[in-house]
Amino acid sequence: MTQFRPERATGSLKIQAWLLSFFSLWLFATQIPYTVFVANHRAKIDAFLGGVQLPASTVQAAIAAAGETDKYSKLHSGTSWCASSLGTEILTFLQAVLLAIFPWITLLFTGILIFILFAAARKGVQPETTSEPTRIDNEKAGS
């Protein structure tokens, strides 16, 4: 008995590669500002009114009047099991740094996977035949 592999076994590889490419670009686009935000410990805030940029002093005054800040550690107080303020700050910092690092590692491995998926989709799979006898063929030959 001859066995055939389905011709469309790799048909979805190209779709998977394109979807991963799209989501990787999306993650990349969101990761750049977050990494800058964590590295600088501040958010850069610009305000526009009618297409004209407001002066930085006006923006800072509005932020202060609202009781807000652009400093990272004040925006994300975090939760901690530690009673001390230092413990809370360390855990908050670690959470922020890990959230900034892990997506870059994800992007690295996703890029490798996208390359492999596109290579596999381009190669294509030809139907393979096997001439190994099956159990049924063995029983027929033995009878």
Image (tube, rainbow, N blue to C red):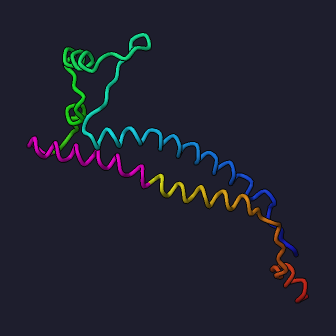
Looking at the image, residue 93 sits to the left or right of residue 122; the answer is: left
- Give the residue furthest to the bottom: 142
Residue lying at 19% horizontally and 18% vertically, measured from the top left? 64
Q: Is residue 57 above or below residue 18?
A: above
User: Whole-percent x and y of residue 117?
Assistant: 64, 58
Q: Is residue 95 magenta?
A: yes
User: Whole-percent x and y of residue 85?
Assistant: 10, 41
| Number of disc labels | 0
Residue lying at 45% horizontally and 53% vertically, measured from the top left? 106
Q: Nearer the viewer, residue 93 or 51?
A: 51
The quarter of the picture where residue 80 lies is top left
Looking at the image, residue 48 sits to the left or right of residue 61; the answer is: right
Residue range of the region highlighted in magenta in the rendering? 82-105
Q: Is residue 53 above or below residue 23?
A: above
Q: Nearer the viewer, residue 116 or 39?
A: 39
Q: Is residue 37 magenta?
A: no
Quarter of the image with the N terminus in it: bottom right
The quarter of the picture where residue 127 lies is bottom right
- Give the residue furthest to the left: 84
Name the magenta segment's main secondary structure: helix
Quarter of the image with the C terminus in it: bottom right
Q: Nearer the viewer, residue 36 or 54?
A: 54
